Image (cartoon, rainbow, N blue to C red):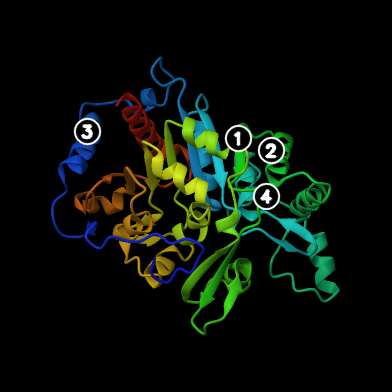
Amino acid sequence: MTGVTASYTWALTASRVSVSGTPDSATTTATTRLANRGSEGDDIMAILEPTAENRNLSLVALCGGVGGARLMRALDQLIPWAALTAVINVGDDETRYGVYVAADIDTVLYTLADIVGSRGWGIDGDATTIMNTLSRLGVDTTFHLGDRDFAHCLWRTQQLTEGSPLSVTASRLATALGVRPAVLPASDDPIATTVQIADGSWLGFQQYFVERAHRDEVRALRYDGADAAVAAPGVLDAIVEADAVIVAPSNPPLSIWPMLAIPNIRSAIEAHRCVIAVSPLFSGKALKGPAEQVLRSLGMGSGTDSILAAYDSLLDYLIVDSSDSADVTLSSTDVAITAVDTRLTPVGRAHDLIATIVRLAGDSDAT
């Protein structure tokens, strides 16, 4: 993969994706099936109700932070009858202020618990006494943790020190917060996403993303520890048993690739019969964050092409936003592309997206 240095690589086939050309029969058939169902007047709300055919629906979502969290919230609120599992990136995890911070895990948990802050992370209305005190002592507090957030991290650190794996701490915190879906770290083993910038130096993820506000051009990425890591308990079983694996609309190189760099997770995804990605792009651009820039700088191209390239060989379906509806005619050997409104806030806006996921999972299960 151009610009990606890691313990794994995944080659891009140049002929696989082309902006020009017509879709092959597999792509046309799957996309037409979705369009025809809509034209026949399917009641979206009815699709989101449990039936004899779908009441045992099981979905796994590969999640980064905000995008993955919001997808999980929409799934949890719109199809609460389904068995839902979030498998979460741990490449962002690191120790700050002496406590273990699992940024993406906490973002997903806080969002599902309906306590997330207005920016999409942290806890709404959280006090700042700890950061204010540290700042007065001369500590750089650019990386901000609210008091309750800090307490959760302190508790996690104590649990890890006493021998509990990360997956157990995530499960315990989910229970304490009243979260229904299973929330699993991708691995209990340490993995660190490291970013090479234009001057050749390597930065820790949070240094690049938070301290430097992801302004630097990304030249390469490493996922240190991923080659020796294994999936956390429950992850592989959830993937194998799922009717569909959903790749959340998170930043592909920064949030999803660290999980795909874990050998047995990647193998399980490759073997799955129904892998659905939700594009994080709108009119070819990210609403927030550096996804568009990072994909381009790593040689993935731009727009929907870049998402197809980022997940080359893994996808059966790609859902793009309706603003990118022209891209359903992209030529791709295996990937069926469909366009719906993919915005996830407010949750009520996500009905079409979640209904499309349910349809695709059901179609795959029936074949």
Work out whether residue 213 or residue 26 is closer to the camera in this orientation and state it: 26
Specify the amino acid type for callout 2: Ser
Q: Secondary structure at mark 4?
A: loop
In this figure, which residue is indicated by the disc labeled 3? Answer: 33
In this figure, which residue is indicated by the disc labeled 1? Answer: 182
Q: Are marks 1 and 4 in contact (CB under 8 Å)?
A: no
The residue drawn where x is 49% and y is 63% is 289
Q: Secondary structure at mark 2?
A: helix
**Camera-nearest label, 3 or 4:** 3
Mark on residue 124? 4
Work out whether residue 262 or residue 238 is closer to the camera in this orientation and state it: 262
Distance Cα–Cα, label 1 vs label 4: 22 Å
Q: Quadrant of residue 235?
A: top right
Left or right, 48 with respect to 66, comes to left
Distance Cα–Cα, label 3 vs label 2: 39 Å
The residue drawn where x is 69% and y is 38% is 171
- The mark nearer the N terminus, 4 or 2, is 4
Distance Cα–Cα, label 2 vs label 1: 7 Å
- For label 1, count other residues whose C-alpha is less than 10 Å away and answer few (under 14), some (14-19) or many (20+): some
The residue drawn where x is 35% and y is 56% is 307
Report the quarter where the C terminus lies.
Answer: top left
Distance Cα–Cα, label 4 vs label 2: 21 Å
